[in-house]
Image (cartoon, rainbow, N blue to C red):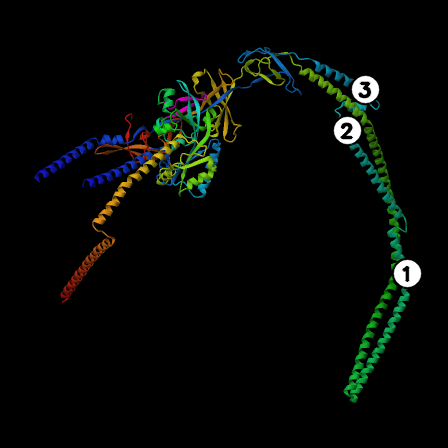
Amino acid sequence: MSENRSKRKDIIKNIAIVFLTVLLILTFFSQTIMNYSLPQVATAYVANDTITTSIRGTGTVEAADPYSVIIGDDKAESATTHKISKIAVQEGDEVEKGDILFYLDEKSNSAIEEAQKAYEEAQAAYETALLSEGVNASVIAQANNSFDAEQYSKQLIEAQKEVDARQKDVDDIQKVIDAFELQISITGSENQNTGVVNAQKAVNEAQKVLAEAPDKLNKAMEAFAAAQGEQQSATDKLNAANSAYEAAVAEGKTEEELNVLVGEVTKAQTELTQAQSKAQDAQKKAEEAQKVADDAPAALEKAQKALDSAKLDQQNSLLNLNQQLATYQLNKKNAENILAEKKLILDTLTGNKGAIISLKDAKEALEDAKKALSEAKKEQVDSVILADLAGTITAIRFKSGESVSTGEEVMVIRPAGQGYTLSVPVTLEQSRKVHVGDGASLVNNWWYEEVKIVLRSIRPDPSDPARKRLLVFDVEGDMTEGQNLTVSIGERSTPYEMVVPNSSVREDNNGKFILIVESKSSPLGNRYVATRVDVQVIASDDTKSAITGALSGWEYVITTSTHPINAGQLVRLSENG
Amino acid sequence: MKSRYLEVIAGAVSLGIVLVLGIVAHSISSDLPDQQAAMRWSDNGNVSQISCYFAEGSQMTPEIFENFRHSLDSLLQQESITVESENPGARLWVDCYSAEGSVILSGSRNQMTVDAMGVGGDFFLFHPFQLMAGAYFSGNDLMQDYCVLDETAAWQLFGSNNIAGQTVNIGGVPHVVSGVISHPKGRLYEAAGLTESRIYLSYESLVKYGESRGINHYEILMPDPVDGYAMEKVKTGLNMHDREAEYIENNKRFSFQNIYHVIKSVGTRSMSGKAIIFPFWENVARGCEDMVALCLLGMALGLVYPVVFSVYGFIRWKKRNAVTLKGVLRRVYKKGAGCLKCIWARIKAHMRRKMAEEDMEEVSDEEMDE
C-alpha cells in the first residue's frame, strides 16, 4: 500500500516538474513565440513632402507642314496614269529646288490632235453663224455678252407682260371715257337728268294741287256743315228723350216703362257722341283743305324755283364732264403710244431670239473646244519631275516600275526650316492639368539630343470628342517623321504637410484610411498595435499621396505586411525598419 | 476494462480527427484573400462580393460596365441605400474588370513575352497580392500607364524586386512600374496556370500595345441588405444569357450550404456546358472548395463513431440500471415534489417568524404607551 502511494507521489511530482519546466520555457520565450506568430509590417513616416504630378503620353512625330509631290494637275477632270521609270532620291535625302525627283515614261499626243481638230471645226461653225440672216449688231452684242437662254426667255416674258399691262391701261382708260360719255348723254338729256326730272315733277304736282284746292275746300266745308246738322239733330233727340223720361218720372210710370225710356236716352246719347265725333273730323278736314288752298300758290312758286336751279346744275355738270372727258382722251393717247413702243420691243426680241440662240450655241461650242484643247495640253506631263522646293524627303509612296495616276501623292517633302508636330491623346481630366505653352520632356531622353517640345494647342480628339483630347506639341530637334515619342508634361511640385507612400493608403466602405503603428508598453516589452486613421487623399503622383486626417505628423504608417492586418491587431515591425 | 479504455481512446481519436479536419477546412477557406474582399470592405456582413465570368467571345466592353455602374447608382438611390459613413470619400460599392492576354516587355536587360492581365477599376482591392515593393495602381488614377510585375518578371527584366518607379517598354511604349508583387505558390496555383511570369497593366494599355482575349471577368462589392439582393441586381444589370456567364457569391462560397451543394454535385461538377475559362484565382477557389468538401465529408465520417458509441453507451447504461421512462419521470416527479415541499416549508417558517416579530412590536408599543 505504502509502495503504491510513494509510486503515485513520484508520478505526480514528475508531472508537476515537467509542467513547470514547460511553463517556464514558454514564459521566457513567449515574446519570441508571439513575435513570430504576428504579421510583420514595413512602415514609413508620415512627413511633409512634395507631390509632383505629370502627364505622360505617346504619339507619332509628323512633319509640321508636309509638301506632297504629285504629277499632272489634280484638278483635271480625268486622271491619266503614268509609269515611273526611275526614282532618283531616297527617304531622308535633302533636296534643293529644281533637283530631279523621278522620271516618267513619255506619253503620246493623240489626244491633243483630236482636240485641235474639234477646235477648228467649232471655229468654222461660229463664223458661219455670224454671217447668217437675221444677225445684226444687237444680236452679236447679246450673243457676245454672257447670254443666258433662260434670262432671254425671262426678258421675252417680261416684254410680253409689259405689252399686256399697257394694253390693259389703254382699255381701262377707254372704259372710263365711255363712262364719261354715257354720263354726259344722261346729264344732257332733260328726260334722263334726275334732278331736272324730279324738279319738273314737283312743279306739275304743285300746279295740280293749286287747281284742285278750291274744290276740295268746298267739299270739306259742305261735309262739315252736314256733320254739324247731324250733331244738332242728335242733340235735339237727346233732349227729347230726357224730357220724356222726366215726364214719365213725374207721371210715375212703371219701372219697366222707365227702363225703356232710359234705354232711349242712352241710345240718344250714343248717337249724339257719334255725331259730335263726326263733326270734329269734318271740321279738321275742312281746316286742312283750307290750309292746302292757302299754301298752294307758294308751293308752286317754290317748285318752279327748284326746277330752274336743277337746270342750271345740269349745265354746270355737263361742262365739268366734258372737261374730264378731254383729259382722259389725252391719257388714252399717251397710253396707246407707250403700248406701241412695248410692242415694238417685244417684236424685236422675238425676232432676234432664234438668231441669238444659234450664234450663242456656236460660240459655246467654240469655247468648249478651246477648253478641251487646253485640258489635253495640260494632261500631258513632263517626263522629268523636279522638286518645287528645298527640303527633306520624308516618304516615298511608289517604287520604280509602278504606275501612278495624276493627282496621286508620289512622295512627301518636309520643307527646309519647318519643324515637327506631335499629337498625344489624353483623357479630359489629364488635359486639365496642362496649359498651352508648357514645355515637355522626353521619357527615355538619353536617346535624343537637344530636343525642344512645347505644347501648342489642346483639341478634342476626333475619335471621342466628349471624353478625350489631343495635345499637339511643336517639336524641334533631330527627329524622324513617323517615330514614336513618349513625353512627360505638366510637372508641378506642390508641397504638402502629410505625405505617405501610395501603398499605405487603404480603403473600405468607410472610405480611405491608413494604419499607423502605436506602441504600448507591457510587462513583457513593447507591443505594437495597428490603429486605423480615416484620411482623405488630396493629391497623388506615381509614388506618394498627400493626405489629410487626424494625424499630428511623423506617425509610422504601415506600407506593406506579410499578412492582411485589421485595425487593433498586434503586429511586429520589420527588422529592416 | 481494457476494451473500455480502447473505446474511449477511439472516440477521442475520432473527435480529434474531426477537430483537425475542421481546423484544416477553416485554414483553407481563410487563406484565400481573393474570396474575402467582403470581409475587408465591411465588418457588418451586409456586403456581398459577386464575381462574374463571361464566355469567350462575349464582347464585354468598359462602356457596358460604365452603363451598369450608372444604373446601379440610380437603383441604390431609389431604394434609399446610401453611404452611412461620415467620411466624404466613402464609396457604397467598388468594382473591377479584367482581361487576359499577353504583351512583349522590354526592360533594361532583355525582352520577353509575358502573360498579361489588363485590369480596370479597383482590381487590387479584390486581389491584394503580397507587395514586395511599391504600390498597386487603380483604374481611378490620373495616369493609366502603370504596371505591376510579379517578382519573376521583375528579376528577369531588372534583376531586382526594388524597381518601383522604373520604366518598362510595353509594345514600345514606356510604362511605369508601380509595384512588384509575389504570387502565392503551391500545387493548386501551379495547376491553375500561375507558373509563368505575369504582368498587370491597364486594360487600355493591353488593348493598345498587347494582345487581349477580351474582358472575361467582372467583380463587384456592393450592399446586400437581404440575402440574394446583390446577386439579383448584378444579374439583372448585366443581363447576360445563362449560358454566357457564371455568377458566384464569393463570401458564401465556403458556407455549409454551398459546401453541401459541392458534395451533392459530385459527378456533375466536372462537367462544363459553358465556354468560360476561369482565371487562376477562381480555379484555386474551386480546388479549395473540393478540399473543404472532402474535409466536411471526413468530419461527418469522423463523427459517426463518437455518436454511435455515445448512443450505444447510453442504451447499455439504461439497460443496466433498468432505467425506464416511467421510472425517470417518477424520480423527476418525486424530486420536484420534494423540492416544492421544502420551499413551501421555508416560506411558512418565514411567515411565522415575521408574524411573531410584528406581535412583539405591538406589545412593546402598548407597553410604551402605558
Judging by the rendered image, the residue that carries numbered circle 2 is A152
User: Nearer the N terminus, badge 1 or badge 3?
Assistant: 3
Q: Tell me how far mark 1 sits from mark 2, CA to CA.
A: 78 Å
Asked whether residue A252 appears in the rendered view, the answer is: yes
Q: Nearer the viewer, residue A449 or B222?
A: B222
Q: Tell me, yes or no, if residue A549 can be seen here.
A: no
For image coordinates 29% across by 25% down, the residue present is A576
Q: Give the residue pinned by disc 1.
A: A208
Between disc 1 and disc 3, the foreground one is 3
Q: Nearer the viewer, mark 2 or mark 3?
A: 3
The answer to if A449 sits in the magenta stretch is no
Seen in the picture, residue A452 relative to B97 is either above or below; the reply is above
- What span is in magenta? B163-180
- Circle 1 crowding by C-alpha within 10 Å: few under 14, some 14–19, many from 20: few
The image shows residue A152, relative to residue A209, as above or below, that is above
Q: Mark 1 belongs to which amino acid?
A: Lys
Distance CA(mark 1)–CA(mark 3): 96 Å
Residues at discs 1 and 3 in contact (Cβ within 8 Å): no
State which quadrant residue B169 falls in. top left
Mark 2: which amino acid? Tyr
Per the image, the residue denoted by label 3 is A128
Q: Earlier in the sequence, mark 2 or mark 3?
A: 3
Q: Quadrant of the N terminus of chain A?
A: top left
Farthest residue to the left: give it.
A2
Q: Is residue A532 left or right of residue A368?
A: left
Q: Position of residue B65 (x, y in %)?
A: 46, 34
Q: Quadrant of residue B37?
A: top left
- Is A447 left, or right, of A111 in this rendering? left
